[in-house]
Amino acid sequence: MASKGPTTSASTKNSSTGGTSGSSSSNGAGDNANQDNTFECNICLDTAKDAVISLCGHLFCWPCLHQWLETRPNRQVCPVCKAGISRDKVIPLYGRGSTGQQDPREKTPPRPQGQRPEPENRGGFQGFGFGDGGFQMSFGIGAFPFGIFATAFNINDGRPPPAVPGTPQYVDEQFLSRLFLFVALVIMFWLLIA
Amino acid sequence: MALMMSGDKGISAFPESDNLFKWIGTIDGATGTAYEELRYKLSLEFPSGYPYTAPTVRFLTPCYHPNVDTQGNICLDILKDKWSALYDVRTILLSIQSLLAEPNIESPLNTHAAELWKNQTAYKKYVRETYAKQAKSQET
């Protein structure tokens, strides 16, 4: 397989075609055709019907592009610039004249829908002054040494003294303490495996 | 395809007959290469799937070249897996014209030509000899 030289030269020739195509058609149909040229499908060279545009910016008829992608399912590239493209990543162009009707005999599936992102809210209320909309929240669990401080400096903050051993209250407190220890262990274990 | 009639230097092509799926093209060897001043005829056969599938392009004039076999078949990536729906007669012929000047020695169809390519003067001489030979045989 010969590859480097001819291919690169072919592609440069292609790009020059795109640039000069306006002038080459001027001897054909006149100035009107000249202008339409920009909106011609790259594959069928007709005015794009059910126009779609690839992310790399190249215009095609949807049926043309669909068939191109269909003929080579394992190598989906833009016919113009060979960038990777895919069926769902093309943008439909809805001109004023488009009817939106499709021939039911047509086998190509309908064009992918246009994406409608939420309009961006520029100006006005911008969070809480944490910079330009870069409001961040974090969720964390306190680290080990701080826990010690928290307990170490909370000496005698008005809590009742522990119950005397042997009373029912003492048994209850022991039980609760074990329960909380168990819960804490479960959470720690969950944190480890998560 | 109508682009063909415009004045690109060294290449031309026209439909063979009323059948628009068969074209005859000619390529002039680029100046400064071993093929300069030599004219080659090619046949281009377009399948019904064109432009989604590549046409079959063959040299009608025997061509001594590392990527062209004795039957005239051409090994060129854009005619095989690198084909794009954008290529037309003009770009194909231009690609083949530049293939003449820059063969791919790595995967030759004609190993003899690939060997000889290293010695450009001998290569040029051989190309001319084979070309003259076939021209003579066509006359008779």
Image (cartoon, grey):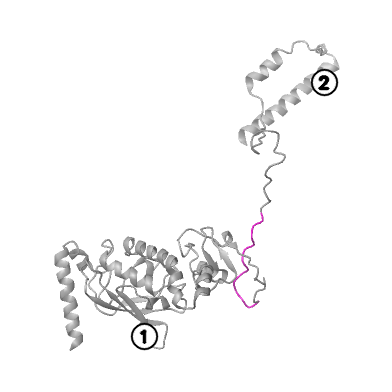
Q: Is residue A115 highlighted in magenta?
A: yes
List the residue tagged with mark 1: B16
The image position of residue A76, as x and y in percent, is: 49, 62
Q: Chain ID for label 2?
A: A
Q: For the point 25% across and 72% down, which residue is it?
A: B29
User: Disc 2 residue type?
Assistant: Asp
Categorize mark 2 by other alpha carbons within 10 Å: few (<14), some (14-19), many (20+): few
Q: For the point 59% across and 72% down, which residue is it?
A: A108
Return the residue nearer the eye: A129 or A6.
A129
User: Disc 1 residue type?
Assistant: Glu
Q: Is residue B26 above or below residue A3?
A: below
- Name the image quarter holding residue B22: bottom left
In the rendered structure, which segment of residues is drawn in magenta?
Answer: A104-116
Quadrant position of the N terminus of chain B in the picture: bottom left
Q: Is residue A102 highlighted in magenta?
A: no
Quadrant position of the C terminus of chain B in the picture: bottom left
List the residue tagged with mark 2: A172
Callouts 1 and 2 on one subunit: no
Return the residue nearer the eye: A20 or B45.
A20
The image position of residue A12, as x and y in percent, is: 38, 62
Disc 1 to disc 2, how far (Cα)? 103 Å
